[in-house]
Amino acid sequence: MSDTEPEAPHEDFDRVNFLELRNSQLAEAIKRVESERHYMEAEILRLQREVKRLKTELDRLRYPPLIVGSVRDLLTDGRVVVKSSTGPDFVVNSAENVDHEKISIGSRVALNKQTLAVMGVLPPSIDPLVSASEIVEKPAVTYEEIGGLSDQVRDIREAIEYPLLRTDLYRKVGVDPPKGVLLIGPPGTGKTLIAKAVAHHTNATFVRLVGSELVQKYIGEGARLVRELFQLAREKAPTVIFIDEIDSVGAKRLEVATSGDREVQRTLMQLLAEMDGFEPLANVKIVAATNRPDILDEALLRPGRFDRIIEIPVPSYQGRAEIFRIHSRGMSIKDPIDFEALASRTEGATGADIRAVCTEAGMFAIREERDVVTAADFDRAVEKVVGEEELRKESVTMFA
């Protein structure tokens, strides 16, 4: 065979296949590299955003702390007179990003630690004790669950509920509705129960505090709590403020008093000013309760503060029978119960005593592993509760 003889056709075919395979592998490699490039670019962007976020957080943490101050005056040239927590008053400028329309006399502001310039306006401060006193979920107590106090319920509805729900009626008649109601009566007669019913039936915000919570250790703290309490009430109006055991903060002012007594008197004076001061209460109503009205200050009892004083007495014979029916309504009772006979045997008992009788009757049934309460259980419960009440009275008399 001659040296110039052409190559065989199958060799050309193998070379073509090899080139096509090589091109396919290169195309796949290029596609894989492109995919990895897109992934790396996305990862670089993510990391850049993370670095930016961390730098911002680091700058925020490195930012010097701000001083809390209060605005004393606004000058005509745009400067502000502030009182810092460090002591004296200062005339300072405001930062450009601060909304000057939000700055007013008395506003809480954040001040630069070095220049004391106003860096921002802070929201008003509300003590956690005051903010936590707001009852979000209304009590389940209704007026139908209050026995023997129909006249008292009517009076408090006219003084508290109707002015909040039917303001137009008072406006047409031309009279100002009562500002506050004072509930007085022995312990266990239903003063707090009535307040719960008022909270249930009104669409108002209900704020509850015990009078002793307004008595604080440091000078001015009690008055500040009272001021913030009424500030919260005005912001969330219509509001009903219920102060239980008000005698702990509203006792008569004495000429000879200790430093603690004088602090209680300052708190009382702030309470008097808030109830009948220059700033109107509008849709804020006050309900207070006490079992010692004899020690209350006369300024607290005058019309304009507590316009209506409602006495919650020990229930009468019919009232005791009605209270027995109310508290036994949800009980599983086997025999017909003569509630009138039980009422005659519990003369002088309060609503709390009658509730204790019904509870004891149920306990007697549980003790004997029965799921129903009988008339005999009520009889034994009356003997036990009445006996404990007499023993309690004897103990009080003995140690008095």
Image (cartoon, rainbow, N blue to C red):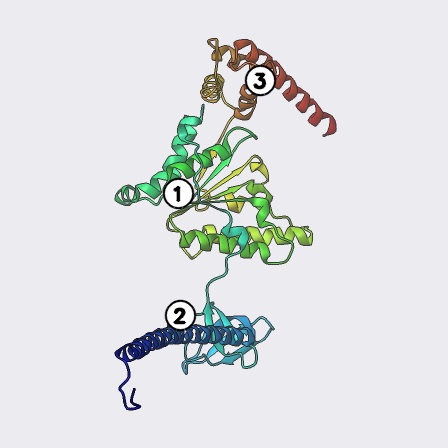
Where does the image place residue 198, in percent across and percent down from the top left? Answer: 42, 37
Q: Amino acid at mark 1?
A: Pro
**For marks 2 and 3 on the same chain, the one whose residue lies earlier in the sequence:** 2
On the picture, is 178 further left or further right than 252? left
**Could you say which quadrant of the image residue 277 lies in?**
bottom left
Q: Is residue 348 above or below residue 260?
A: above
Near-viewer residue (2 or 397): 2
Instruction: Write the residue at 41% across / 31% down.
Output: 142
> Which residue was labeled with disc 3?
366
Which quadrant of the rendered structure holds the C terminus? top right
> Which residue was labeled with disc 2?
102
Instruction: Write the residue at 67% across / 24% down.
Output: 392
Q: Is residue 331 visible?
A: yes
User: Residue reaching furthest right?
Assistant: 399
Q: Residue 280 bears which disc, if any?
A: none
On the picture, is 12 further left or further right than 274? left
On the picture, is 301 further left or further right than 13? right
Near-viewer residue (260 or 335): 335
Q: Is residue 103 above or below residue 375?
A: below
Which of discs 2 and 3 lies nearer the camera? The answer is 3
Q: Residue 178 bears which disc, if any?
A: 1
Q: Report helix, strand or loop for mark 1.
A: loop
Cα distance in 3D space between marks 2 and 1: 35 Å
Q: Amino acid at mark 2?
A: Lys
Where does the image place residue 70, in percent across and percent down from the top left? Answer: 51, 70
Q: Is residue 251 visible?
A: no
